[in-house]
Amino acid sequence: EPEVTQTPSHQVTQMGQEVILRCVPISNHLYFYWYRQILGQKVEFLVSFYNNEISEKSEIFDDQFSVERPDGSNFTLKIRSTKLEDSAMYFCASKVDRGINQPQHFGDGTRLSIL
Amino acid sequence: DQQVKQNSPSLSVQEGRISILNCDYTNSMFDYFLWYKKYPAEGPTFLISISSIKDKNEDGRFTVFLNKSAKHLSLHIVPSQPGDSAVYFCAASALYKLIFGTGTRLQVFP
């Protein structure tokens, strides 16, 4: 069964450094998402992306965050200058089409630890 | 922001019995709901969903019930198996995003 893959599984970075989290969505999917889960808290939406544009972003997704689909397969989340509070699990998800009654499929996440 | 709530942080059920996980929402505009299962160190795995035009959807051992007037949905697992032990998240679809509840940890014991 096709799946969303994320790399790396764990990223340790010094505060203030840039980090790029990578995702390969399911190949025929058109909608892409990033979510995060801070330890002990709920999964929170960050951003949705379609047709090389951001469809919606949350208030968490400030100017330090950006997303990109640099080629036909990868979808990346960049944090420009990391803060301690960016430490979380980051999940990438994809969905096949615009139909609202379609599930999003998630990768296994990247654990980001900011020191 | 408590648009989707799961008021029971944990549930313990004996193998073979029914597990019932509950979820409440506040926004009557939500029209598609999903349940995800999550094991440690893995991402959420889609389990089952329901559209607001239905009040029940069944898939094998899993059934989701939706009560729109009460803004409540529930997931029934029958019979429960030890492999069902995981954290279960309820989510509501809001156009471009999912809004998750805080999760219920289900433990199925022999």
Image (cartoon, coloured by chain):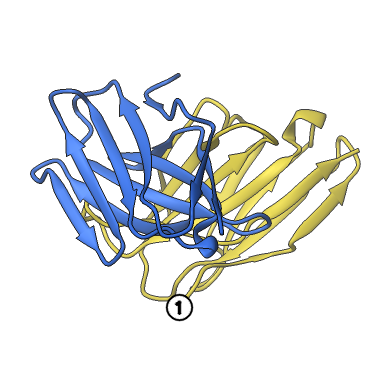
Give the left or right position of residue A28, taking residue B67 as reference.
right
Q: Mark 1 lies on which chain?
A: A
Could you tell me the amino acid type at mark 1? Pro
The residue shown at (45%, 78%) is: A2
x, y percentage for residue B28?
A: 19, 24
x, y percentage for residue B90?
A: 39, 41
**Residue under pointer 1:** A2
The hue of chain B in the figure is blue
* Secondary structure under the numbered disc 1 in the rendered image: loop
The residue shown at (35%, 32%) is: B23
The chain drawn in yellow is A
Instruction: State the residue lying farthest toward the bottom.
Output: A1
The crowding category of the residue bearing disc 1, from other C-alpha atoms within 10 Å (few below 14, some 14 to 19, many at least 20), is few
Which quadrant of the figure contains the C terminus of chain B?
bottom right
Which quadrant of the figure contains the N terminus of chain B?
top left
x, y percentage for residue B66?
A: 19, 38
x, y percentage for residue B56?
A: 15, 48
Residue A74 or B71: which is nearer the viewer?
B71
Give the left or right position of residue B44, taking residue A84 as reference.
left
| Figure quadrant of residue A104 | bottom left
The residue shown at (70%, 36%) is: A39
Residue A104 or B54: which is nearer the viewer?
B54
